Amino acid sequence: MKKDCLEIVRSKCESCTGCALAKTRKNVVFSDGNPSTAKIVLIGEAPGEMEDETGRPFVGRAGQLLNEFLSNAGISRDEDVYIINTVKCRPPENRVPTEEEQSACRKFLNAQIDIINPRAIVLCGATALKTFVQLDKKQTISKVRGQWMTINVDGKDYRAITIFHPSYLLRNNSMADGSPRRLMQEDLANIKNEILPDIDHSMDSNDVVFMESREIAMV
């Protein structure tokens, strides 16, 4: 049912000409992840060059780093997370999307959240955070990341938390205490414990096949 509803939204999104980004895109970058099993909606900023080429979010260098951090935290990108962006088309030169562009895409973003109905929303980076939360000048992402909050999407409240965008981590390689990468590690561990305590990905499919073959051999 979720997949069917999302396909309707995708179809409308792919024919959208609501802002100037429709003129320069190669592909609409709608989402990634399994909507039937995802418990978390992760929202990034906007598609980049690789995403525009493939039609999938977070597939470039930043996406590969995100995959590594998710895996290390015991969070499955394929099963636990439904990934979207504040806008569905790549802004030229990978610039930050304008308020007008975000506004044109907001109905699709809200519809995806409503259909998935996640246990939590992860706001990945400052742009995603500012889409839902008004910040004063003293509130930087470094000060609000890792803190649970409640955000409202079309009249419904969701638990939400902010993490660093992985593109920022590409410029910060240290894993020392208090470093952005260490904080990212801690935030994802927090998300896993709070939102996915009942899900264990410690055994991959190969482990399962191996155990089943052993059980058959022992019969």
Image: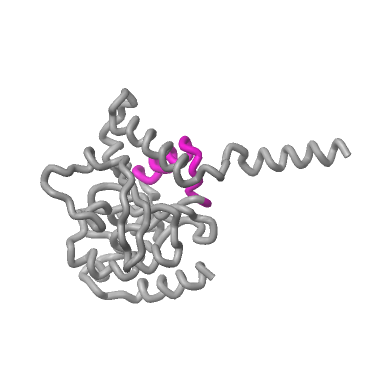
Q: Could you tell me residue 172's position as x and y percent?
A: 27, 32
Using residue 92 as the reference point, say whether residue 31 is left or right of it.
right
Using residue 198 as the reference point, say whether residue 137 is left or right of it.
left
Q: Residue at x 25, y 66 (%)?
A: 24
Using residue 38 as the reference point, say whether residue 61 is left or right of it.
left
Q: How many marks?
A: 0
Q: Main secondary structure of the magenta part?
A: helix
Q: Quadrant of the C terminus?
A: top right
Q: Is residue 171 visible?
A: yes
Q: Could you tell me residue 181's position as x and y percent?
A: 33, 32
Q: Residue at x 24, y 70 (%)?
A: 104
Magenta residues (range): 61-79
Which quadrant of the structure image shows residue 171?
Answer: top left
Which quadrant of the structure image shows residue 69?
Answer: top left
Q: Residue at x 37, y 38 (%)?
A: 187
**Nearer to me, 155 or 13:** 155
Q: Is residue 124 above or below residue 152?
A: above
Q: Could you tell me residue 188's position as x and y percent?
A: 40, 39
Residue 74 colored in magenta in the image: yes
Residue 25 colored in magenta in the image: no
